[in-house]
Image (cartoon, rainbow, N blue to C red):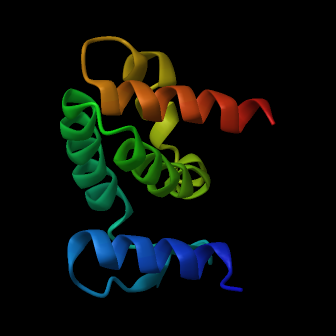
Amino acid sequence: MADDGSKLAALNSATLGAEMPQITLADGTKVQTGTVGALLVNIRSYNEAHKAGDKSKMAQLEEAMRATLPLLDRVGMFDLFRPEEWITGDNEGRKAVGRMYQEFKSQ
């Protein structure tokens, strides 16, 4: 079974259509590139699936978006853009990410 980094790398690469490398930050933290880009693509796709009422596609995209949360948390994405900000408005994909992050942090 692949580790979380390998799973995220595979998801990012599949979403973006290119193999995305892992880099090491100055503090030694390994970060999978393409994560934010893949998340944005998946949010757009989620919005389309929501509009079409495609619950199966939405569930698939939720899994991919959920896989990004540990890395985005580690690099401070949700300090910069708080989950409450993701949840406000009419963008269903952003709302889903904000709610999933709140669930992630409550575990």
Q: Kindly give the residue lying farthest to the right in the view shown.
A: 107
Question: Relative to residue 24, is residue 50 drawn left or right?
Answer: left
In this view, 106 is above or below 73: above
> Which residue is located at x 54 percent, y 49 percent?
66
Question: Relative to residue 100, is residue 46 drawn left or right?
Answer: left
Q: How many marks?
A: 0
In this view, 5 is above or below 100: below
> Which residue is located at x 46 percent, y 57 percent?
64
Q: Residue 28 location in percent, x, y?
A: 62, 78
Q: Which part of the image, by quadrant, shows the C terminus? A: top right
Viewer-closest of 41 and 57: 57
> Which residue is located at x 41 percent, y 18 percent?
87
In this view, 15 is above or below 41: below
> Which residue is located at x 58 percent, y 47 percent?
73
Question: Relative to residue 42, is residue 62 drawn left or right?
Answer: right
The picture quadrant where one finds residue 53 is top left
Q: Residue 21 location in percent, x, y?
A: 38, 86
